[in-house]
Amino acid sequence: MSRARNGGFTLIEVLLATMLLVGGLALAFATLRSASAVSQRGEAIAQRSERVRAVEEFLRRRLAAALPIAMGIDPQSQQPMLFIGEPQRMRFAADVPDYLGRGGPYLHDLSVAGDGEQRNLLIALTMLQSGKPIEEGTALPPETLAEGVQQVSFRYRGMDPQSGRLSAWLPQWEWHDRLPLLVRIEIRSGDAAWPPLVVALPQSSNPGAGQ
């Protein structure tokens, strides 16, 4: 016959209970760490999404405010330059709100700086007067709109003055005396691409007005 068990726990039972407790605590801590990591990743994604929306909204407003105002004279054609579009640089005139400057038309110079996978999208603003940029004292460095991006590309689409037809998306805008109809900006950061930004520019029947 088995001997009747006295009150209390045996050593084996205590060891088993301890192991279960340790396992439960480890699982709890692992769950907390996992939840914290998920929360941090979610917060980082939310911050990135908010930053993307803010930058794209800024670019949309600036491009939508573009004006057919001369930024200088093309040395080859001797025509006023209203828009200069390159694969990774874009220049145009637009009014700015007071919080960005003194108001009135400014040369907007969007450019990409850096190499490899660490590139920055920059913007520089310079006041325009009588169709020429005016340096206001000490030149301020360009402002960074997006940093550490892998790829930035600008594309342009408008009416071809020779064929009278809508052009394809072009990496270079050749007709400096007129604004393109559309501008497309594509940005890639890390392993994700930003939503493509396509903006329709205002058109005027009087190119060069406001010189």
Image (spheres, rainbow, N blue to C red):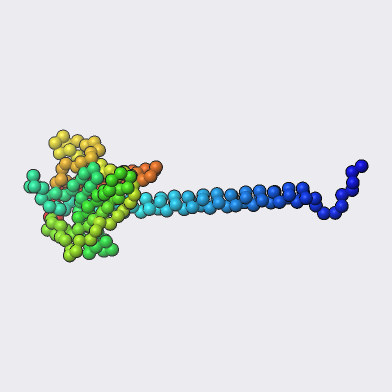
Front-lying residue, 118 or 35: 118
Q: How many marks?
A: 0
**Residue that sits furthest to the front in the current view:** 11
**Residue that sits furthest to the right in the current view:** 1
Q: Position of residue 163 (x, y in %)?
A: 16, 34
Front-lying residue, 12 or 152: 12
> At 24% from the left edge and 45% from the top edge, which residue is drawn?
88
> Looking at the image, can residue 185 be seen?
no
Front-lying residue, 81 or 111: 111
> Looking at the image, can residue 3 be seen?
yes
> At 20% from the left edge and 58% from the top edge, which residue is drawn?
126
Front-lying residue, 185 or 204: 185
Q: Position of residue 148 (x, y in %)?
A: 34, 49
Q: Position of residue 117 (x, y in %)?
A: 33, 45
Q: Position of residue 60 (x, y in %)?
A: 30, 50
**Residue that sits furthest to the top in the current view:** 163
Locate the C terminus and report the quarter of the image it occupies: bottom left
Q: Is residue 57 left or right of residue 157?
A: right
> At 19% from the left edge and 64% from the top edge, which residue is drawn?
138
Q: Is residue 12 left or right of residue 2?
A: left
Q: Is residue 33 left or right of residue 170?
A: right
Locate the N terminus and report the quarter of the image it occupies: top right
> At 22% from the left edge and 52% from the top edge, which residue is drawn?
109
